[in-house]
Amino acid sequence: MSEPSFPGSSRFWATAVFMLALVHAAPLPAQALPGTGMPQTSWQLQVEAHHARVYENVKSFLARWGKLAEAKDSVALSALYSPRASSVAAGSGYPDAFERQAVVDQLWGLEFAGARIQVVITDFETSGELAFVATRITMNPTDYGGPQQTRSGSALFILRSDFYGKWHIRSQVVALTRPETDAQPLPGSPTN
């Protein structure tokens, strides 16, 4: 039978020194209670800061895109696209476009020229030099262009940052609602 350890015994001091060495030699990672989250490391904070910075850059880029379309500046607007940009105008009947000027011509055919455009980001993700952006677009008529009546829809943009940190649209899909005068009820939907 072993004898108990008392503060004056060598066994007590051996155990105390062992426990002290164990605690100082291997610090335990912080534990989080469910619902309180895990402590963030510096790389996680850097990733979040990068994500927020890219989001703000892309948001201002798309605002500029809308302003250039409203100004009908096809040269500056085409410069926002990469040389091999592609665009699909879903459900519009327009053919797909596969270079800068063809993309701008497609936008003009969709009545973007002169329209007051509001772009709201609904989903955003970034990975390296790419940004994937889902948006809600509203086009309002102006005295100098745009659609006959307000149109809305959605657009998906894939943007790429170049060597200098400038963003360019690599690919886009634009799906606008049809004007009310042209709209036909979907098959199986109730009619008034």
Image: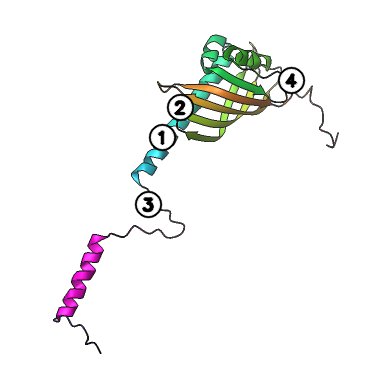
Amino acid on which disc 4 is placed = Gly
Q: Residues within 10 Å of mark 4 (few under 14, many from 20)?
A: few
Image spot of residue 187 (x, y percent): 84, 34
Amino acid carrying mark 1 in the image = His
Tag 2 secondary structure: helix
Task: Give amino acid for label 2.
Answer: Asn
Q: Amino acid at mark 3?
A: Pro
**Rendered location of residue 124, percent (x, y):** 53, 35
Q: In the image, which is nearer the foreground, mark 2 or mark 4?
A: 4
- Disc 2 and disc 4: Cα gap in Å? 32 Å
**Is residue 136 shown to the viewer in this render?**
yes
Q: CA distance from mark 3 to mark 1?
A: 19 Å
Magenta stretch? 9-38
Q: For the N terminus, which image quadrant?
A: bottom left
The dot on residue 57 is: 2
Mark number for residue 93? Answer: 4
